[in-house]
Amino acid sequence: MKPKDIAIQPFLDSRHGLCPGCGSAIAMTHIQSIVSQPLPSGKIKKIRSMVIPASCWSIGSGFDGVSFIGTNLVHTPFIAGATVGEGISIMSKRRGANNDEITIVWAGDGASFDIGLGLLSGAAIRNADILYVINDNQTYGNTGAQESGATPKGAKTQTSPNGKTIAQKDIIEIMMAHKVRYYASIALSVATIDDFYAKVRRAADDEGFRCLHLLSVCPPGWKCDAAKTPDLAELAVQTHAFPLVEVTGGRFCLTKPKREKPIEEFLKHQKRFDAIINSPETLREFQEQVDNRWNYLLNLTRPA
């Protein structure tokens, strides 16, 4: 089934409180629609519950007993998303739920890279039957864009006004170290939509612990034009700022973009990177870091 064959359903209520141009809101609608239509096995899965730790979605998904995302909704503290999702999955099966139901944990980078990393690790190592989506906007967006473990080095945030001085945590290596059943990085744009849909369908169709690492363009946090959300997601992939990888059964795959561009093309549309763009030497160093990382990932795809 191709993207054009999947009908996008209006799961997200217009009353949601998310920002204009929110990449996460767009992706949420697509992912729910993909899961709810025939998967590669022929199954149509029902979303049992959407578990959302503290994040922008704590506001955007609903409140006072009202869900704005068209499914059962469980809000949790920052740290607890993976464990609560695992508990819901276990108890649902004990009560007779079948494998046509799916529990999705939708957690931000702060709740995944930092505050909730320990419990995410536990769920991964236990092969918990959840689909864990890292909604990565590279910042603590709900509280005004503070630095997280996913914030790129050099990016300005409220807590790093001169630019972050340390590198991002490597969530790919962290997930691979857990030997997870399925991990994939995804970005939603015109150029990457086939890759996006294929990975979401494979993850939803499987069982056990599956992790989708979603790049979510955040106009307020990235200080970019809200109208450029799909373009920036595409540029992140084309410039190798956000490599599209897939790890299944220990097999590592890297998707090479059809068009490759220098990192400047991604950075120049975001004011959080002004200091890098305005310094040729710093920009050159940034490009070298991106190139080195890309070459490292390329080597992982080759036989020893």
Image: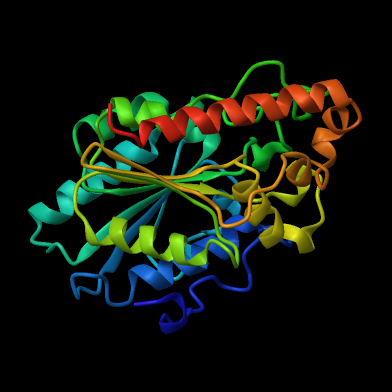
Q: Nearer the viewer, residue 153 or 60?
A: 153
Q: Is residue 40 above or below residue 110?
A: below
Q: Is residue 111 above or below residue 130?
A: above
Instruction: Please provide percent x and percent y for residue 257.
Output: 55, 53
Instruction: Please provide percent x and percent y for residue 212.
Output: 40, 48
Q: Is residue 280 above or below residue 35?
A: above
55 with respect to 182 (left or right) = right
Residue 201: quarter of image: bottom left
For the N terminus, give its image quadrant. bottom left
* Residue visible at 39% across and 27% down in the picture: 173
Instruction: Please provide percent x and percent y for residue 35.
Output: 34, 68
Residue at the farthest right position? 278
Residue 226 shows in the view: yes
Question: Across the whole image, how many numbered discs are drawn on residues?
Answer: 0
* Residue visible at 29% across and 59% down in the picture: 202
Q: Nearer the viewer, residue 217 or 245?
A: 245
* Residue visible at 53% across and 61% down in the picture: 192
Instruction: Please provide percent x and percent y for residue 84.
Output: 31, 41
Q: Nearer the viewer, residue 125 or 11?
A: 125
Residue at the farthest top position? 165
Residue 95: quarter of image: bottom left
Q: Nearer the viewer, residue 35 or 168?
A: 168
What is the basis of the colouring in this image?
rainbow
Residue 162 shows in the view: no
For the C terminus, give its image quadrant. top left
* Residue visible at 12% across and 55% down in the picture: 93
